[in-house]
């Protein structure tokens, strides 16, 4: 019980002392609080005593053992311990290969292999003068070599002729005379000889032990891998070692393009200025540099194949394009072989929902990043040679739109192709075939879309604040009828070239592309014939997103991607038939100038 004296106790005591009369003493009245002893009570803290020196030393050692540098050193030691058998085998291989290389070098030296190879090449090429010169070099070098050997042998003989008698005399004198009876200077000579002999008896055995070790180290150094550094001692081998690109390699590659102003710049000792140093960018390396006077980015792009060869890459892996200015070169170089693989499975195959206002998963960029292709506010033109993936790309976009519950889908296939038959339950309108009825239905659909566009324009004008375009919030209001409406036309060149409906369909498509995008109406066109007589020029000029799979020439390239793209280095002509199936060059789908997309 915790107690505290009450003020009344003091008052009673004072009254008893002051009054002088007998007062019954009842004891002090205490205020208190009952404490349950069964509850856990705080343990009194023991005073901290300074630890012993051994404890302090142990604690310090524990902290050091867990520190960052020691942990890294321990990891390296543990890794090297695991790799010790492999390292030992590799060192043995280096020693064997080093001895073999020495043997090859000696054989080449002894047999004049290089000069004989020169003579053989001269004989095969029919150059008698070069052959005669190589043979004369062989004879003259052999004569000089034997002459040098004769000089060495002569000096050895002279040395032995002088040293032999001297050694014999010293041995004879030492055998018949005692050291005490010799002249002082002769005794000193024998003392020096004994010192040299003692040193030799120690040095020679030591040399016999050290020499093999030195020989093995030298042979291992000679037989090592011809790669810079010795990274294998501290880290595993890197699989991407041949993918590294730096400014030195880029400058050297540009110096051998055969561009006259650039060659003159290098001859005068000029050095390129890199506004963005070579850095890792996704699945490749990106660099930006300012070209010297008289050189444009288009001139470099025109020699793309030679630049790729200089960098040790395929043309598809090297993308020189024009930057913000004509004299600024944007260069992106893919890691070796990374573009050969596909994009993999579509992320929405098994589950998920799409909001078309946020985009549709379309493929992987050249940097290995998933691209959400925009739908609302843009129109698409997809083209390429047959069988290279244009219909599959169109299906991917339509599949993404189908996963938005608010989107309405129309589809027309101007040919006998079942590519879009599985979409039939999800489509509001569907036509497939090459007869006039399908062309008429597609043309009527374009006309109905224009009518719908006018209606939507009036609805938007009646909304508070007069919004300029359809938004997600407005599209979710079912009563307004502003839901996304996606219309796809595969093999659209058949429609635009139709003798009866082609002209009208082209006019309707151009009007719809120019104005319909802000009303939530999306037009997706796919073709294998992107020529000026098959695709209206105004369609190419006004379409927002252009996608080109492998195409045959510059005309088809610019017909899909826009005028001037081929000259700027944005070329789908570099894509190889079948080898690069599913890979396309796209513009307008991101903020980048172009994207090399491996479609899902």
Image (cartoon, rainbow, N blue to C red):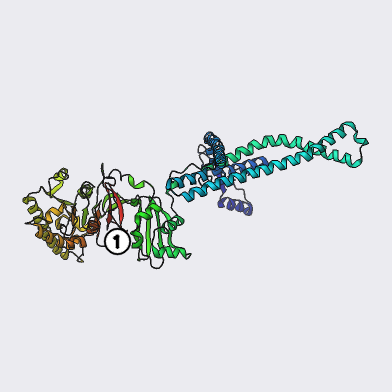
Q: Position of residue 483 (x, y in %)?
A: 17, 55
Work out which quarter of the rendered image holds the N terminus and state it: top right
Residue 27 visible in the current orientation: no
Q: Position of residue 560 (x, y in %)?
A: 23, 57
Give the answer, above or below, for where 304 lies relative to 237: below
Using the image as rendered, state which of residue 473 and residue 443 is in the foreground: 443
Q: Position of residue 140 (x, y in %)?
A: 58, 47
Using the image as rendered, state which of residue 21 and residue 45 is in the foreground: 45
Using the image as rendered, state which of residue 428 and residue 591 is in the foreground: 591
Q: Is residue 388 left or right of residue 71?
A: left
The total number of labels drawn is 1
Q: Is residue 488 left or right of residue 346?
A: left
Q: Residue at x 38, y 67 (%)?
A: 294
Q: Position of residue 420 (x, y in %)?
A: 16, 45
Label 1 sits on a secondary structure element that is loop
Sort mark 1 into few (<14), some (14-19) or many (20+) by Cα contacts within 10 Å.
some
Give the answer, above or below, for where 161 lies relative to 296: above
Q: Residue at x 39, y 49 (%)?
A: 335
Outermost residue on the bottom side: it is: 293
Check disc 1 and report the residue beneath it. Answer: 567
Give the answer, above or below, for where 514 lies relative to 122: below
The picture quadrant where one finds residue 61 is top right
Residue 344 visible in the current orientation: yes
Using the image as rendered, state which of residue 371 and residue 85 is in the foreground: 85
The picture quadrant where one finds residue 454 is bottom left
């Amino acid at each position: 019980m915790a107690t505290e004296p009450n003020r009344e106790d003091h008052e009673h005591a004072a009254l008893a002392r002051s009054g002088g009369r007998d007062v019954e003493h009842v004891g002090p009245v205490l205020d208190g609080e009952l404490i349950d002893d069964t509850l856990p009570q705080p343990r009194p803290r023991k005073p901290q005593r300074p630890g012993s020196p051994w404890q302090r030393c142990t604690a310090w050692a524990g902290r050091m053992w867990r520190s960052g540098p020691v942990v890294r050193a321990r990891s390296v030691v543990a890794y090297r311990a695991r790799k010790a058998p492999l390292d030992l085998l590799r060192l043995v291989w280096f020693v064997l290969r080093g001895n073999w290389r020495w043997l090859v070098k000696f054989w080449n030296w002894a047999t004049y292999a290089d000069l004989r190879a020169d003579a053989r090449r001269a004989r095969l090429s029919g150059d008698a003068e070069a052959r005669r010169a190589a043979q004369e070099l062989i004879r003259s070098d052999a004569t000089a070599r034997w002459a040098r050997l004769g000089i060495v042998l002569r000096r050895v003989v002279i040395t032995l002729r002088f040293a032999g008698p001297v050694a014999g005399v010293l041995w004879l004198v030492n055998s018949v005379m005692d050291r005490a009876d010799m002249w002082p200077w002769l005794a000193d000579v024998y003392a020096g000889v004994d010192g040299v002999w003692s040193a030799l008896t120690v040095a020679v055995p030591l040399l016999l032990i050290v020499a093999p070790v030195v020989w093995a180290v030298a042979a291992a150094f000679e037989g090592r891998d011809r790669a810079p550094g010795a990274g294998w001692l501290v880290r595993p081998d890197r699989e991407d070692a041949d993918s590294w690109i730096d400014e030195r390699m880029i400058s050297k590659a540009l110096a051998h393009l055969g561009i006259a102003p650039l060659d003159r710049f290098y001859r005068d000792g000029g050095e390129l200025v890199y506004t963005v140093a070579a850095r890792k960018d996704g699945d490749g390396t990106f660099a930006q540099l300012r070209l010297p006077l008289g050189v444009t980015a288009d001139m470099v792009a025109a020699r793309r194949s030679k630049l790729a060869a200089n960098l040790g890459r395929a043309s598809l892996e090297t993308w020189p394009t024009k930057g913000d200015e004509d004299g600024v070169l944007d260069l992106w170089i893919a890691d070796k072989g990374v573009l050969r693989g596909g994009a993999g499975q579509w992320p929405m195959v098994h589950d998920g929902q799409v909001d078309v206002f946020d985009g549709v998963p379309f493929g992987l960029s050249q940097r290995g990043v998933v691209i959400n292709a925009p739908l609302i506010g843009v129109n698409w033109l997809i083209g390429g040679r047959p069988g290279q993936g244009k219909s599959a790309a169109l299906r991917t976009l339509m599949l993404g739109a189908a996963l938005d519950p608010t989107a309405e889908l129309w589809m027309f296939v101007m040919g006998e192709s079942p590519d879009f038959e599985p979409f039939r339950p999800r489509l509001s309108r569907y036509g497939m075939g090459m007869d006039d009825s399908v062309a008429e239905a597609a043309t009527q659909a374009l006309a109905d879309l224009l009518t719908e566009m006018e209606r939507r324009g009036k609805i938007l004008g009646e909304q508070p604040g007069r919004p300029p375009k359809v938004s997600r919030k407005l599209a979710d209001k079912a009563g307004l009828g502003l839901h996304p409406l996606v219309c796809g036309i595969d093999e659209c060149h058949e429609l635009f070239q139709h003798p009866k409906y082609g002209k009208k369909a082209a006019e309707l498509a151009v009007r719809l592309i120019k104005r319909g995008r802000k009303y939530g109406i999306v037009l997706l066109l796919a073709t294998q014939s992107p020529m000026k007589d098959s695709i209206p020029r105004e369609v190419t000029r006004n379409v927002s997103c252009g996608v080109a799979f492998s195409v045959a020439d510059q005309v088809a390239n610019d017909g899909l991607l826009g005028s001037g793209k081929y000259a700027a280095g944005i070329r789908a002509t570099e894509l190889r038939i079948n080898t690069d199936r599913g890979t396309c060059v796209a513009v307008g789908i991101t903020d980048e100038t172009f994207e090399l997309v491996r479609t899902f």
